[in-house]
Image: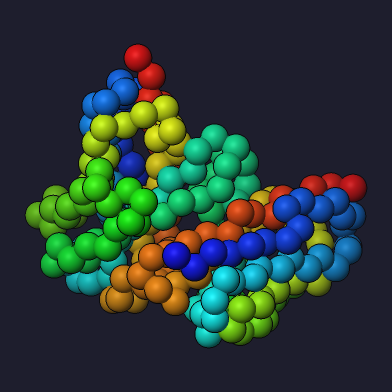
Amino acid sequence: QVQLQESGPGLVKPSETLSLTCAVSGYSISSGYYWGWIRQPPGKGLEWIGSIYHSGSTYYNPSLKSRVTISVDTSKNQFSLKLSSVTAADTAVYYCAKMIGIVGASIFDYWGQGTLVTVSS
Amino acid sequence: AIQLTQSPSSLSASVGDRVTITCRASQGISSALAWYQQKPGKAPKLLIYDASSLESGVPSRFSGSGSGTDFTLTISSLQPEDFATYYCQQFNSYLLTFGGGTKVEIK
């Protein structure tokens, strides 16, 4: 059974960089599949942030691309999200998820529980 | 970006009712559509993929249909555990997008 667990600071100051890590268990990232980040502002809908393959190939949402970096560490079986220059609009629950298939255009079959990140001074 | 418009945004229904939710894409996406269920405080759960394929373990009262631009999620007989918010997601392009969600509430 694949399990994902997000971790990182729950509070980030405006203009700083949000950093989250997703630890994967039950499956080796090196074996394949894309892995993604999705966020959900309080009381609102889902927004895809970006996805990464074990090789490091990435796809980003153009609306966030200038501020987002997703990386993978196969030795630790985890992948990470960095979002720079955050504002209050970046306050959201951040989810990491496994994607079906080996192409970037896919869907999410396993999700982490999500972690709330609040941007505030 | 491909926009997905869900309707209605919310609905009230009773246990045993047949419920239909619609998702319309701003351009044709073939059958590259998935449906998720999300309960408060929980991560979304995959229900349907490829517009009409039922994810393993999902009850058969859930079904999906459609192709091109118009899609539907149907719950044939609403159960108490089905009260939740439902989202569609397209994967026809690498810019993945979700619909705005449909909240199914108890009447």
Left or right position of A34 against B104: left
Q: Is residue A40 visible?
A: yes
**Quarter of the figure with the C terminus of chain A:** top left
**Side (left or right) of B71 relative to B27:** right
Q: Residue at x 73, y 61 (%)?
A: B7
Render colour scheme:
rainbow
Q: Nearer the viewer, residue B85 or A25?
A: B85
Image x and y of residue A61, in percent: 34, 56
Q: Position of residue B9 (x, y in %)?
A: 73, 53
Q: Nearer the viewer, residue A59 or A29?
A: A59
Q: Give residue B31's position: percent from left, percent from top.
A: 54, 83
Any part of residue B52 in sight: no
When asked about the image quadrant of residue A2, the answer is: bottom left
Whether residue B15 sits left or right of residue A1 in the image: it is: right
Specify the quadrant that holds the N terminus of chain A.
Answer: bottom left
Q: How many marks?
A: 0
Residue located at (34% from left, 45% from top): A5
Q: Nearer the viewer, residue A85 or B41?
A: A85
> Residue sitting at 54 percent across and 44 percent down?
B42
- Relative to B96, residue B52 above or below: below
Toward the left, the furthest residue is: A75
B87 versus A80 height, above or below = below
Q: Residue A108: x and y, percent?
A: 43, 64
Image quadrant assignment for residue B21: bottom right
Q: Residue at x 41, y 55 (%)?
A: A48
The answer to whether A105 is drawn above or below residue B31 in the figure is above
